[in-house]
Image (cartoon, helix red, strand yellow):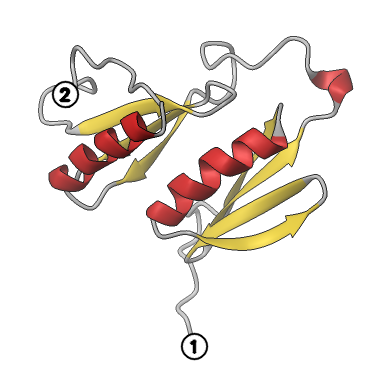
């Protein structure tokens, strides 16, 4: 198979260290498979999911590095935003999150918490990393 080479500067991968690999795997596997990703690699201390040329890696944080805990408002990663398929898909995701006991963030402003013309849902993973799914314009 002859695939086009990814554009220079496009994202290759993101690696996230997580406090509980099992909980993160349950959360991210469901979500990423829903978004079209496929399991790419797995090993004792981690796993990765891939969509096209981009992949996300999740690695168990060593206990010596648990303190201070992650907080998205500190320096570092604030959130990951994914393209959604449609506004209807974003709405379905809200229902699926509720069925999994996951409360969307900013529900009082949903689906425009990101501003006018920005149709999205925001929620958190087990480590409170914010995740966003944005409907196309």
Q: Residue at x 70, y 37 (%)?
A: 21
Q: Is residue 105 above or below residue 60?
A: above
| Secondary structure beneath label 1 | loop
Residue 116 position within the rendered picture, expressed as x and y whole percent measured from the top left: 11, 23
Residue 117 seen in this snapshot: yes
User: What count of labels does the image hold?
Assistant: 2
In the orientation shown, which residue stands out farthest toward the right? 64
Q: Residue at x 62, y 43 (%)?
A: 25
Q: Residue at x 48, y 48 (%)?
A: 30
* Among the two numbered marks 2 and 1 on one chain, the one whose residue lies closer to the N terminus: 1
> Which mark, by number, is residue 41?
none
Judging by the rendered image, the residue that carries numbered circle 1 is: 2
Which is more foreground, mark 2 or mark 1? 2
Q: Is residue 22 above or below residue 111?
A: below
Q: CA distance from mark 2 to mark 1?
A: 40 Å
Residue 120 position within the rendered picture, expressed as x and y whole percent measured from the top left: 23, 33
Query: As drawn, is 45 to the left or to the right of 81?
Result: right
Q: Is residue 66 above or below residue 44?
A: above
Residue 83 position within the rendered picture, expressed as x and y whole percent measured from the top left: 31, 47
Mark 1 crowd level (few <14, some 14–19, many ≥20, 10 Å Cα): few
Query: As drawn, is 88 to the left or to the right of 104?
Result: left
Judging by the rendered image, the residue that carries numbered circle 2 is: 112
Q: Residue at x 78, y 30 (%)?
A: 61
> In this orientation, which residue lies closer to the viewer: 128 or 80?
128
């Amino acid at each position: 198979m002859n695939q086009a080479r990814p554009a220079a500067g496009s994202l290759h991968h993101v690696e996230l260290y997580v406090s509980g690999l099992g909980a993160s795997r349950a959360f991210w596997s469901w979500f990423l498979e829903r978004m079209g990703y496929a399991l790419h690699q797995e090993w004792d201390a981690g796993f990765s999911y891939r969509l096209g040329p981009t992949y996300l890696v999740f690695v168990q944080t060593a206990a010596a590095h648990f303190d201070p805990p992650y907080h998205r408002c500190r320096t570092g990663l604030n959130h990951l935003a994914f393209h959604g398929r449609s506004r209807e898909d974003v709405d379905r995701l809200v229902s699926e999150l509720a069925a999994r006991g996951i409360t969307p963030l900013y529900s009082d402003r949903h689906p425009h918490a990101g501003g006018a013309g920005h149709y999205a849902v925001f929620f958190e993973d087990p480590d409170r990393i914010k995740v966003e799914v944005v409907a196309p314009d």
